[in-house]
Amino acid sequence: MTEELTQKQIETLRAISSFMDDNGVPPTLKELGRILGVRSDQTVIDRLAHLEAKGYLVLSNQARGISLSEGALVFLGKAPSSRISVNSALGAKNKEPL
């Protein structure tokens, strides 16, 4: 994640994150386009492709196939807590409920 993001890329990343927080699923191209005020699906696709190339998204060919990478979560201040990972590992090792 050494490449800087443009304002439009930051806007796109935040829009995806916000939509996922509100709806529990990633937006479709049309939904993301409406949020961003972009009419062309190709413009949305281009923005997503650039974010994927920079390592902030993982895209799939499935419906709603947008996932935020760990780097995106760190950028957005939503990185998973390391405490959870440690507790999960200890609980699994000791077979004790947390």
Image: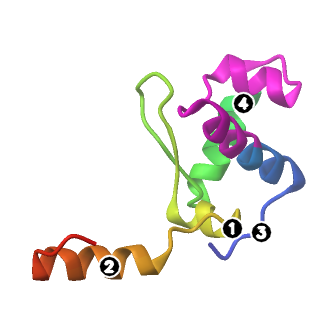
User: Does the magenta run of residues contain 41?
Assistant: yes
Three-letter amino acid code of the residue under disc 3: Glu
Mark in front: 3 vs 2? 2
Question: Going from the N terminus, do you reach mark 1 or mark 3 first?
Answer: 3
Earlier in the chain: of badge 2 and badge 1, it is 1
Amino acid type indicated by mark 4: Val
Q: What range of the chain is rendered magenta?
A: 15-42
Residue to which mark 1 is pinned: 77
CA distance separating discs 3 and 2: 34 Å
Q: Indicate which disc, 3 or 4, sits on the residue closer to the N terminus.
A: 3
Residue flagged by tag 1: what amino acid is it?
Gly
Q: Alpha-carbon distance for marks 4 and 2?
A: 39 Å
Q: Decide which of tag 4 and tag 1 comes sooner along the chain.
A: 4
Q: Which residue is mark 2?
A: 87
Name the residue rendered at 68%, 35% in the picture. 19
Q: Secondary structure at mark 2?
A: helix
Q: Which residue is denoted by mark 4 in the rendering?
A: 44
Q: Which residue is mark 3?
A: 4
> What amino acid type should be assigned to the residue bearing mark 2?
Asn
